[in-house]
Image (cartoon, helix red, strand yellow):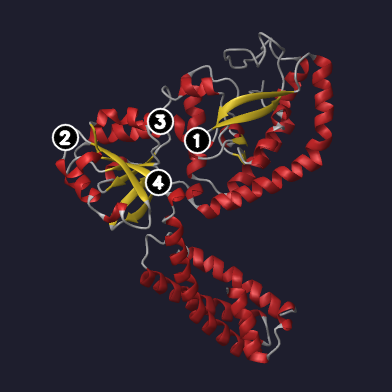
Amino acid sequence: MLATCFLFACYIDNGAIRDVLKLPLLAIVLLSIIVWYVGARIFLLYGEITIFSFSQEMTVFLRQLVTHLLILTFILFVFYTQFYQFRSLLLYYHLLIFVTLPFEKYFYRVVVAYVRRQYKYEKNILIVGDGALASNFYRSDILHNDLKYNLVGILGDNDNKNFNSKYLGSINLLPEILDQKSIDEVFLALPGDAIEKTDYVIDVCEKRSCRVNVIQDINRLGAGSFEVTNFAGFPVVGIRYIPLDDAENRFFKRVFDIVFSALFLVLVYSWLWPIIALAIKLNSNGPILFKQERWGLNNDKIICYKFRTMYMPSTGEGSIGFKQASRNDKRVTAVGQFLRKTSLDELPQFINVFLGSMSVVGPRPHPIPLSLESKDLVQNYMLRHLVKPGITGWAQVNGSRGETSHPDDMRKRVAFDLWYIQNWSFWLDCQIIFQTIVNMIKGDENAY
């Protein structure tokens, strides 16, 4: 829309649209888009539309428009001696933005409302609470607006007649309900003094990677990060808001994953895998690749690929049962020792990245038996699955890799993973990739 407005402004100003493809007009339009994007991110112009009404959004838009005009004018005035030639162009440009963008943003709201009314975007929710707060929330517009929520039921220690047939039973049934029904989000509507019940609900939900939204009274929870939103007029706080909840951040991370993995598969893996495959075949009998089920995003099972590093059959990696690799493990082949030491055994996982089941950077996916063992021993273990698993991660570059022979080893690893999830940024991913390359070159004593 900005580019279109600029084209029409050029036509109104001098009648020559083709000049936009020449300097300095091309530089001005590109600079304009960059300035607009940065300003819009600062003013939250493209935030969730359920938070702001259209009138509030227009207030933010006007602030953004004025700021954009002032910054663009200042930059051109400082760096371009012929600035006066573009005064009328800038005026027409911003007048067109003022006229067209409100229509565009209103049309966007109409489209979003239509999309959210479609069945495939419906979310199943569960309310936990039986008091006045839960009753008010139940009678609100939460089930009758464009958010398209489907209330599966309500849990509470007392049967409230206002809930009709939606009452499912006591709060103690929460684990059973989450296991039996497909619940996307839980809305916690307990009184402020129900500390033990609140902690119980949050603990049960997080162990199952189910998102929790707390209605009011959240100051005592001490969550590491959260996001305040508004549902049907109710202030709601989502526990443990993470940067990758933002669709734009997920988009940029996925684009990076696709580009990085594609380049690696073409430039490195295409010629390196035949050499490694031949070495594996000459060293021991068995398949070249080792495939294992692991938990990915939202606990979905994925097939994780690695170069085989252990002997076959009964005591190898593919045998029934699970045992972590340990230092001087006799199951590891001679070639496997080298592959593990240099982390080259992980290279086939770039196929996982390209296909979308993994990311270049993220919490390392553990074998399912190890995850089942750890989820009840390590608090918040299942929160690792709120993002895609990665080939490398913050825990690995900080030395937390290899065998986890003691629960404290896993707790340390999970702490690193949760810190990464809550503090994700593109530059942090770049830092982790760089540190991984350095560790591969100098070697890691925990890689065995």
Task: Using the rendered image of the protein, determine whether residue 401 is visible from the camera's viewpoint.
Answer: no
Alpha carbon of mark 2 to alpha carbon of mark 4: how far? 26 Å
Q: CA distance from mark 3 to mark 1?
A: 10 Å
Residue 157 on image: x %, y %: 19, 33
N-terminal-most mark, 2 or 4:
4
Q: Find the distance from the CA under tag 3 to the CA under tag 4.
A: 20 Å
**In this figure, which residue is indicated by the disc labeled 1?**
385
Looking at the image, residue 242 lies above or below residue 333: below
Q: Which residue is mark 4?
A: 123
Image side of residue 62 versus residue 359, left or right = left
The one nearer the camera, 224 or 333, is 333
First reached walking from the N terminus: tag 1 or tag 2 = 2
In the rendered image of this protein, does residue 103 appear above or below residue 404? below
SS for callout 2: loop
Q: What mark, if any, has residue 207 been given in the picture?
A: 3
Q: Residue at x 69, y 27 (%)?
A: 306
Quarter of the figure with the N terminus = bottom right
Q: Amino acid at mark 2?
A: Asn
Name the residue nearer the viewer: 193 or 210. 210
Residue highlighted by disc 2 = 158
**Residue 291 is at least partly visible in this image:** yes
Vertical relation: 283 (above or below) 46: above
